[in-house]
Amino acid sequence: MGYIPLGMVFGFLFVQAGGSWLMALLASLVVYAGAAQYMMVPMLAAGMPVSTIALATVLVNLRHIFYGLSLLDTFPRSFVLRWYTAFALTDETYSVLTTLPRDTPPRRLALLALLNQGWWVLGTLLGALIGTQAQVPLDGLDFVLCALFAVLTVEQWRARSSPLPLWTAVISYALAAAVAPRHALVLAILLSIVVGVVAHKREKR
Amino acid sequence: MNDTAYLLAVIFAMGAVTFGLRALPFLSAHWLRRSPVIQHLGRFLPLAIMALLLVHSASGAAREHATGPWPELLAIGLTCLLQWRSRNPLLSIVTGTALYVLLRNWH
């Protein structure tokens, strides 16, 4: 249910930026990724190339690779349910599925995933309809993306096994921004992967 | 935002990329799960990447106006504090964004 208001924010921002409600709805059906969808609104409004937006989506959603890894055994075996649940593995759905008891029937996992997307799509539609009614000339509404990243960082911090990833990220970004300001994010992610691999090798010794 | 072909291209490209990332473990499960490095990165990277995205998006927002990074720092501080205490993403995001919009539109 928490997905309705967050979906509304997406639908609202999409329509305020000049998009149609139909396209907002399609994005929530096809892309279905909270942070990436918030990110796409200013990028679309600026008319950025498809390849740039696709690359940014890889960076924002890279973490999702690791979500599936921890859920492999509990996933439904049926072809359609299995791939749908993989498709729908957002941050919110992942955190719900990992809190379920291990003997939960796999079909229930798929159902919960579907329900979550249903709320997200419904929220998008409501937000888009509100957004077509009135123009809100306020600066800074797209800060929702920052706020969402802040929330996800806090939740990752709560689940951390060590504080090292946080310090790695901050120092990597400072270094990357000093060396190559235009590619700071990509460079900093690469640096963090290197540090993660090196930290693993040292731990083993 | 009215070019339908462009919007469709972006939406389907983003959908394909996102699905690819989420489905990867199910395609290459054996290789990925047997690798201890991948296991370790699975614990290490999500926090690092989230923190990077936060710093990146906040510094991008701070560069858009002349008042310095104070609105971003205050609003992110409030969002983190609320989330830490309440575990309610909606409350944290809406309150943090409201403070930010207020600070940015004050003058």
Image: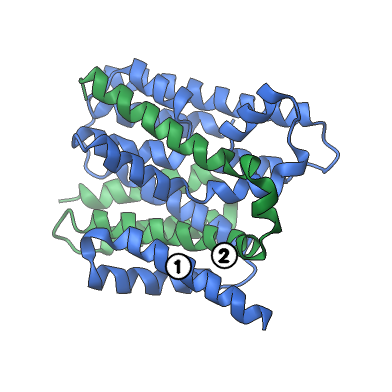
- Measured from the top left, where is residue B46 in percent x and y? 53, 57
> How many numbered discs, if any?
2
Decide: is B50 above or below A34.
below
Q: Who's the residue at 56% across and 27% down the image?
A: A117
- Measured from the top left, where is residue A105 in percent x and y? 82, 31
Element class at badge 1: helix
Front in this rendered view, residue A119 or A64: A64
**Residue under pointer 2:** B44
Q: Amino acid at mark 1?
A: Ser
Decide: is A44 above or below A149.
above
Q: Are marks 2 and 1 in contact (CB under 8 Å)?
A: yes
Q: Who's the residue at 41% across and 69% down the image?
A: A191
What is the chain letter for disc 2?
A: B
The chain coloured green carries which letter? Answer: B
Q: Is residue B84 shown to the viewer in this render?
A: no
Image-based side of A87 in relation to A61, left or right: right
Q: Who's the residue at 21% across and 42% down the image?
A: A139
Q: Name the quarter where the N terminus of chain B is drawn.
A: top left
Q: Is residue A191 shown to the viewer in this render?
A: yes
| Drawing shade for chain A | blue
Element class at badge 2: helix
Front in this rendered view, residue B85 or A112: A112
Image-based side of B79 in relation to A137, left or right: right
Q: Who's the residue at 51% across and 35% down the image?
A: B19
**Residue under pointer 1:** A192
Q: Judge the density around disc 2: few (<14), some (14-19), many (≥20) Cα neighbours within 10 Å.
A: many
What is the chain letter for disc 1?
A: A
Q: Amino acid at mark 2?
A: Phe
Q: Judge the density around disc 1: few (<14), some (14-19), many (≥20) Cα neighbours within 10 Å.
A: many
